Each structure stands twice: as C-alpha cells, then as structure tokens.
Image (cartoon, rainbow, N blue to C red):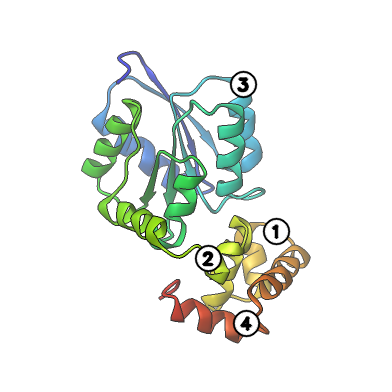
C-alpha cells in the first residue's frame, strides 16, 4: 500500500454520506487528502484535473448515474481503483459493478473495520469481494448462456426497473434520479419492450419472482 498521502475522491449526492465515508477512512488511515463531488459533472472534472489513488462512488447520482460514471473513469484512467458505495443490496448491482471495473461493491451499512479491510486490499492492487458477491459471480459463471430478461437491460434501465418494481411512480423516479419525467417514461418503454412485459404490474411480479426486490 502507498506510504505517501492518499488522494481520495468521495462522490455522493448527500453531504452526510460523504462526511461519514471521510470520517471512517480518516479514523483508519493517516495522511489522506479528500476531494468531494456531488454529481457526475463534478466527478469527471476532478478526474480530468488531478490524479487519484481511489474514488468512492454512489450509484444514484444526479446527471449520469454511478455505473455510467464508473465506465467513464475506467476508460480514461483504468488504473484508478473505484469503490462503489450503494444503498442497493449486493444481489442487485454488485456483479454489474465488478464487471464494469469496480474494485469493490460495498453497501452503505458496512462497518468501519470491513471498510478498512477493503481499502487495504484495494490499495495493494487487489479486488475486494465479500463472500456473497463471490458466490453471485460464481453462480453467474456456472449459469446458463441464456440470460434472464432483466440482464438485457442497460444499467440505467435496470435501475429504473427496480424503482418501478418497488412501487415508485414515474414522477417520483424522475425526482430521485434528477431526470425528466419524459426520460423516465422512455426508459420504462424500453424496459417493457426488452423484457416483453405489458405494464408496471408485470414488472413488479417479475421482480418479486426473481428475488430482485423485497
């Protein structure tokens, strides 16, 4: 692990979450220089302007979502390790995130000790996988070549699909994702077409049947 000052970019649209991540990291490591970003534009500006030892990134971000930003970061600077911090359970986005280049997928209820373990492994050049994520990846590798319908969705479509299946309206989703109602409606239409579903009720039924929402 690097001995000099660590430069860490903390990206989340909630100030309290950014503060919590920075405090937890500061409690476990000496000599850290932080920068903060609250949306995708700010993240990419920081990525272009300076060098970073680590980026922590939320999935729900105003503008482009975290999964898209992750891909942008890895395309520009593939050497920068990125940790995805998310409220979504591991079985919803972890495999997608690891495939896209994330060095870890951590839920926001992670303990300070586990966060420290993850960071040490990542800064040493490794990938941090919880046992449950490793099992998800193993199951996917052993699974059928015929992918389930939801895996044909883009990352943003999948995110909107989960929110619709959880009972949120198009307008509520638009507010949560900082997108227009028209944009969310287009995503909804694409989801229905790709998954051969007719309406929101069928989306919800599919999500529960496949254990994608609780």
**Rounded to the nearest whole Å, what is the CA distance between mark 4 and mark 2?**
21 Å
Front-most of 177 and 147?
Answer: 147
Pick whichever of labels 2 and 1 is earlier in the sequence.
Answer: 2
Of tags 2 and 1, which is closer to the observer? 2
Label 3 SS: helix
Pick whichever of labels 3 and 2 is earlier in the sequence.
Answer: 3
Mark 1 crowdedness (10 Å alpha carbons): few <14, some 14-19, many ≥20? some
> Residue at 44% across / 46% down in the picture?
98
For label 2, the residue is 147
Q: Is residue 16 visible?
A: no
Pick whichever of labels 3 and 1 is earlier in the sequence.
Answer: 3
Residue reaching furthest right?
182
Front-most of 56 and 102?
Answer: 102
Relative image position of residue 25 (x, y in whole percent): 32, 34
Of tags 4 and 1, which is closer to the observer? 4
Kindly indicate the quadrant of the structure image that contains residue 43.
Answer: top right
> Residue at 56% across / 33% down in the picture?
74
For label 1, the residue is 179
Front-most of 21 and 146?
Answer: 146
**Rounded to the nearest whole Å, what is the CA distance between mark 3 and mark 1?**
27 Å
Label 2 SS: loop
Label 4 SS: helix
For label 3, the residue is 49
**CB-based contact (under 8 Å), mark 3 and mark 2:** no
Which mark is drawn over residue 200?
4
**Rounded to the nearest whole Å, what is the CA distance between mark 4 and mark 1?**
19 Å
């Amino acid at each position: 692990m690097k001995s000099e000052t660590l430069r860490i970019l903390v990206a989340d649209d909630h100030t309290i979450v950014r503060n919590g991540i920075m405090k937890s990291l500061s409690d476990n490591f000496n000599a850290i220089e932080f920068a903060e970003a609250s949306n995708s534009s700010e993240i990419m500006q920081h990525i272009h302007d300076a060098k970073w030892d680590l980026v922590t990134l939320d999935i729900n971000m105003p503008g482009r979502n975290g999964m898209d930003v992750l891909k942008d970061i890895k395309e520009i600077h593939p050497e920068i390790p990125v940790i995805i911090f998310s409220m979504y359970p591991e079985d919803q986005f972890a495999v997608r995130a690891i495939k896209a280049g994330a060095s870890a997928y951590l839920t926001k209820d992670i303990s300070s000790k586990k966060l420290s373990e993850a960071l040490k492994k990542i800064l040493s050049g490794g990938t941090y996988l919880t046992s449950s994520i490793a099992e998800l990846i193993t199951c996917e590798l052993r699974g059928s070549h015929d992918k389930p319908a939801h895996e044909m969705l883009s990352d943003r479509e999948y995110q909107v699909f989960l929110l619709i299946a959880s009972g949120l309206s198009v307008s509520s989703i638009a507010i949560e994702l900082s997108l227009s109602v028209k944009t969310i409606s287009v995503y909804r239409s694409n989801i229905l077409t790709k998954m051969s579903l007719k309406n929101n009720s069928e989306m919800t039924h599919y999500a529960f049947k496949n254990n994608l929402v609780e």
